[in-house]
Structures are given as structure tokens and as C-alpha cells.
């Protein structure tokens, strides 16, 4: 395990070096990425130009949701975003190469490249998270101060699990990119808003099926000491780490099943 | 070293039937293949497109799980021991890149050292040796994407050999290469086979690869082995027809010699085909000379290309 991680660091390190060779182009793509991903937040600001609160959440509070979701998603994107290339890897036979190397297949897929441009999203998310944390009215306790960090770590595991599980569809359907993206990029978007403003079905979906509500909504309720308008048990506010482990485990099962199927059926 | 016993691989494909209806159909890509390869052998694995060559290689390297039969490579069952096996074999797919596209060759080799956990000294010695034989030095620092196909293939071969594999699997290693690069690849393979005793199994469409390299030839078609033996044996069995090309003093009607037949006439030149067991080239030459004044002659041996083409066309042997 330690050794595997060391190899991952080496592979990724070499990718970073090769991308940093072109400093200007790197700086430009990151800046462009900051601006592009800021549009998501601009949409929230536009919304608050019309209303004072969104499902009883103030703009600062929504910014907290946004910040947590955005940072988690950016970190996930950097770590496993290469899964978007999986359909191409399968189609062009690159996945076969992966299977003849003495390393786990998932590790090799996610380390095949590293999209440093996503640092832009991370930067933007961190800024908004920082501003939100100083602007919200919170009676800070150690537990409340630690929760955003816990939420981000759990959020990375949840997003990564969703990404892995839905990318695995590519082993059955080669042109599955759009479906996977609906759940990954779509998921990050959903986690930027308070869950209570959604309709019943979407709410149930993001709480019980694809647990995006545990990335930002429940942890934020705890940080802000807000009553849950959905009237769900307050224990859920601490459930994110457990949910994250469950999602990651489920994703691992899906991945291994998918790879086994690929190897017995071919593509 | 490699042992296959009644190996099968069936794929199920969907065939269009009408606008919406699809039907599942079983395709047997490999249909009961059995053979053994001993340590140190250099075996050529040939067959027309779609014969099941790549599928076999994928089963031997642990990429695909066989649907039936038994496979053993270096004493391991590839589909169950994929990672263990990966450390003991080298694999080169001629049409794909396994090196990191935007890294210089040297960095790729360095990463492979860690991935395969090769001791530094061993790795260094191997890299020095292969750099020398394959003349890698001029482009070691260049990113793979900027290399020519020939340079890249030399890099791929090195990459597959750095961890001292016992067996090397090559799927069309010379495809797309120019003549010089092909020769270099062949020399390299012959050397590692001879000096390191590495077992090599290669698939190819270029029969010159086989002629220059392989002591043994396996021909498969429709998922079955249809020939297993030496190249000489193949020619002896299926290529017994030789051709005598004669230049006469002046154009003449096709010569009539018993036991030989004229297959082509071009001005004063005629091509006569005859069987080894019916007569010798000297006997035929004498017979021709007694019928018309001879200026020049050559004997053409059947080439493997013709033989294999005939075998493919006739299917079973």
C-alpha cells in the first residue's frame, strides 16, 4: 500500500514536472479555469440579487455550501479526473496495457495524467470558502471549526466514489461519457445548493441514493447550527465520514466487477 | 514455459436484425488451441486477420480470461495471477504506446524501474546494454510523442525488457517500420533470445520476421492451430513445387517436358514449375536444353509467403 502510493507519487510527480515546463501556458490555463469556474458562483450571486434567502439560507451560508462542494470536487477532479479518459482507453486498447503492468488498474487509470488546470477550480473554491467562513455568523467551537475540513475529506471520497462507479459504465457501454458526467459534474453542481430547496424526488436521490447531501448540506447544518427544515435526525450531520466510506467501498466493488467483466467478455 | 490445453474464447456480439432488434450471437475467437512452448524457444504465431492471434496473446498475458481450457505461463495461471505474472513477462503491442506520451524516454524507464521494483544496478546494466544495442542515446531525453515510429518501437522494446522478463510477448512488433528499423528489431530479439535465453512468442504479418527469427512456426486460422513446426518443414510439405526460369535464344511456344508445366511465357523467357520428388533441377535443365538452345537459367524456391497464402486459402491443412 505504502509502496503503491510511492509509485503513484512518482508517476504524478513526473506529470507535474512535464506540465510545469511551459510556465506561461500553465499560468494562463489556471487563470482561465478560475474565471470559468467562478461563473457557477456568479449564478448564485445573480439569484441572490432577486431574493434575500434561498430556502432560508443566506448568501453567506450558500457560499459555505458552495465552497465546501467546490473544494472537494476540485480535489477529486485532480485526483481521479482521468477517469473521463476511460472510454478512450478502452476503445484504443490502452486499458490492455494497464492490465499487463504489475499495479492495480484503477491506480494506473487515475494516474495516467494529471490535469493541473483544475487547480483553478480549487483556488476559486478556497477563496469563496475562506470568505464564507469569515462572513457567516457562527459561534465557533473546535468541533464546528473542524467540520469543514472533515466535510471536504468526506466529500472527496464521496465524489471520487461516484466518479469511479459511474465511469465503470464504460466497460459496458463505450459511449457513456455523458451519463458519467451527469453524475460527476452534475453532482458537484447539486452539492452547491441547500438540499431543502429541491423537489421531493431530487431530495431523496441526493440523500439516500447518491449521497451528495453529505458533502456539504449536512456538515454545513452543523457548522451553522441551523435547524434542518427537512426534519431529519440531527445525527446525519455527523454521518459524512461513514457515508464516504460506504460510497468508496461500493465504488470499489463496482470497479472490480466491471474490470472482471471486461476481462471475461472483451470489448 | 507456455502451456495451452484446449483453450477457448467465446465473445458474444450483438448483430443488427432490423431497425431495433438485435440478436446475440456467439463468436468463437479461439476454438480449442493446444500447444507448448519450451524455455528459450522463439516462436512465430501467424494467421490472417481475425484468426484469433491477439486474443490468444491477451489470454497468455492475463488481459482476458479464457472461456474454456487451461492456460499456464511461467507456471502461473495468467487470469488469476495477473500482477505476479506481469513481473515475469514483457509485452509489446506494436500498434499501441505503452510509454508515457509526454515524458522523455529516460523518465519512462525510470518510472518502470519503480513500477517493476527492479534493483537499481540491474536496471542500470540493462538500460546501458539496450541503449547500446538499440542506439537509444540520441533520443533518450526526447518526449515519446516526438519520436519516430522506429525510435518509439526501440523504446518500447527496452521498456518491456528492463525488468528481466522470462518471456517476451510481441504483437506485431515490426508493423509500420521501415526496412532498417525492422532489421534492428529482429537483431535485438534474436540477441535477447540467444544471450539471455528469453522465450519469445511473436505474432506478425511480415513473414520475413519469421524466416529470419523463428525456429518454430504456429499458424492459426478460425481459432485453431493448423500448422505447428519448422519453416523448412512447412516448405517441404506444402511448398514442394519449385520453379525453373529459363531464357531461350529466341521466343518459342511453351515447352513440353514431362513432369513439368509452363506457367508463364514472356518473350524468350519461360517459367516451368516442377515437383521436387518428380525430378531434379539438373534433369529438367537437361530436358529443356535438348528442346531449345538455352542462354540462362535460375531456380526459384517456393517462398514462405506463397505457402502461407495457399494454406490460408485452403483453410485446413
Image (cartoon, coloured by chain):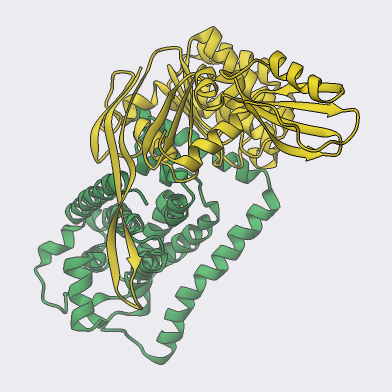
Chain colours: A green, B yellow
Residue A12 vertical position relative to residue A179 in the rendered view, above or below? above
Q: Is residue B173 above or below residue B24?
A: above
- Residue at image location 49% in from the left, 44% down from the top: B49
Q: Residue at x 39, y 54 (%)?
A: A76
Q: Where is residue A38? Give x, y as percent.
A: 51, 71
Which residue ends up furthest to the top in the rendered image? Answer: B195
Identify the residue shown where x is 71% and y is 38%.
B148
Task: Indicate left or right for B270 with B64 as reference.
Answer: right
Q: Is residue A158 visible?
A: yes
Marker count (numbered): 0
Q: Give x and y (percent) for residue A68.
A: 35, 62
Q: Using the rendered view, name the quadrant where residue B83 is placed.
A: top left
The answer to whether any part of residue B98 appears in the image is no
* Residue at the outermost bottom position: A50
For the N terminus of chain A, the quadrant is top left
Q: Position of residue B70 (x, y in %)?
A: 24, 29
Left-right relation of B246 to B4: right
- Foreground residue, B129 or B34? B34
Residue B243, horizontal then vertical, whole percent: 68, 27
Nearer-the-camera pick, A191 or B212 = B212
Name of the residue lying farthest toward the right:
B249
Comparing A96 with B253, the one in front is: B253
Q: Is residue B97 above or below residue B123?
A: below
Left or right position of B264 against A190? right
Amino acid at each position: 500500500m505504502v509502496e503503491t502510493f510511492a509509485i503513484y507519487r512518482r508517476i504524478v510527480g513526473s506529470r507535474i514536472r512535464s506540465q510545469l515546463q511551459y510556465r506561461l501556458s500553465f499560468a494562463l490555463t489556471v487563470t482561465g479555469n478560475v474565471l470559468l469556474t467562478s461563473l457557477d458562483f456568479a449564478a448564485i450571486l445573480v439569484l441572490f440579487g432577486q431574493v434575500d434567502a434561498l430556502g432560508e439560507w443566506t448568501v453567506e451560508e450558500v457560499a459555505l455550501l458552495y465552497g465546501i462542494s467546490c473544494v472537494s470536487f476540485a480535489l477529486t477532479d485532480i485526483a481521479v479526473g482521468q477517469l473521463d479518459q476511460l472510454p478512450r482507453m478502452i476503445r484504443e486498447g490502452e486499458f490492455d496495457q494497464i492490465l499487463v503492468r504489475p499495479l492495480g488498474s484503477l491506480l494506473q487509470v487515475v494516474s495516467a495524467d494529471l490535469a493541473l488546470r483544475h487547480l483553478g477550480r480549487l483556488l476559486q473554491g478556497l477563496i469563496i470558502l475562506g470568505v464564507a467562513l469569515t462572513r457567516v455568523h457562527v459561534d465557533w467551537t473546535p468541533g464546528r471549526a473542524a467540520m469543514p475540513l472533515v466535510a471536504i475529506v468526506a466529500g472527496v471520497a464521496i465524489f471520487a466514489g461516484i466518479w469511479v462507479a459511474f465511469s465503470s459504465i464504460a466497460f459496458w457501454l463505450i459511449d457513456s461519457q455523458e451519463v458519467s458526467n451527469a453524475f460527476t459534474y452534475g453532482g458537484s453542481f447539486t452539492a452547491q445548493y441547500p438540499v431543502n430547496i429541491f423537489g421531493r424526488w431530487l431530495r431523496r436521490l441526493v440523500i439516500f441514493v447518491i449521497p451528495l447531501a453529505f458533502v456539504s448540506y449536512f456538515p454545513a447544518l452543523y457548522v451553522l447550527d441551523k435547524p434542518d427544515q427537512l426534519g431529519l435526525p440531527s445525527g446525519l450531520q455527523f454521518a459524512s465520514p461513514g457515508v464516504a466510506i460506504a460510497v468508496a467501498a461500493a465504488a470499489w466493488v463496482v470497479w472490480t466487477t466491471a474490470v472482471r467483466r471486461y476481462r471475461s467478455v472483451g470489448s | 514455459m507456455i502451456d495451452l490445453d484446449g483453450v477457448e474464447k467465446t465473445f458474444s456480439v450483438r448483430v443488427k436484425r432490423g431497425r431495433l432488434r438485435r440478436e446475440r450471437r456467439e463468436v468463437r475467437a479461439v476454438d480449442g488451441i493446444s500447444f507448448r512452448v519450451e524455455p528459450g524457444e522463439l516462436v512465430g504465431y501467424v494467421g490472417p486477420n481475425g484468426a484469433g492471434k491477439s486474443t490468444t496473446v491477451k489470454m497468455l498475458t492475463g488481459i482476458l480470461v479464457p472461456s474454456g481450457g487451461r492456460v499456464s505461463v511461467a507456471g502461473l495461471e495468467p487470469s488469476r495471477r495477473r500482477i505476479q505474472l506481469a513481473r515475469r513477462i514483457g509485452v509489446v503491442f506494436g500498434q499501441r504506446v505503452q510509454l508515457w506520451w509526454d515524458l522523455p524516454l529516460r523518465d519512462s524507464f525510470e518510472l518502470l524501474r519503480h513500477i517493476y521494483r527492479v534493483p537499481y544496478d540491474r536496471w542500470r546494466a540493462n538500460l546501458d546494454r539496450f541503449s547500446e544495442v538499440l542506439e537509444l542515446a540520441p533520443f533518450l531525453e526526447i518526449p515519446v510523442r516526438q519520436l519516430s515510429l522506429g525510435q518509439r518501437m526501440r523504446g518500447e522494446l527496452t521498456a518491456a525488457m528492463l525488468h528481466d522478463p522470462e518471456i517476451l510477448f510481441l504483437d506485431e512488433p515490426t508493423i509500420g517500420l521501415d526496412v532498417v528499423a525492422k532489421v534492428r528489431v529482429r537483431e535485438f530479439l534474436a540477441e535477447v533470445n540467444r544471450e539471455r535465453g528469453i522465450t519469445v512468442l511473436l505474432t506478425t504479418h511480415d513473414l520475413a520476421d519469421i524466416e529470419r527469427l523463428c525456429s518454430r512456426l504456429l499458424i492459426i486460422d478460425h481459432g485453431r492451430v493448423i500448422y505447428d513446426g519448422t519453416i523448412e518443414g512447412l516448405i517441404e510439405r506444402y511448398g514442394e513445387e519449385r520453379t525453373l526460369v529459363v531464357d531461350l535464344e529466341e521466343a518459342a511456344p511453351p515447352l513440353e517436358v514431362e513432369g513439368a508445366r509452363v506457367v508463364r511465357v514472356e518473350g524468350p523467357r519461360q517459367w516451368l514449375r516442377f515437383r521436387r520428388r518428380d525430378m531434379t533441377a539438373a534433369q529438367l535443365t537437361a530436358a529443356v536444353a535438348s528442346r531449345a538452345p538455352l542462354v540462362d537459367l535460375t531456380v526459384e524456391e517456393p517462398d514462405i509467403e506463397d505457402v502461407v497464402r495457399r494454406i490460408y486459402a485452403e483453410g485446413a491443412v
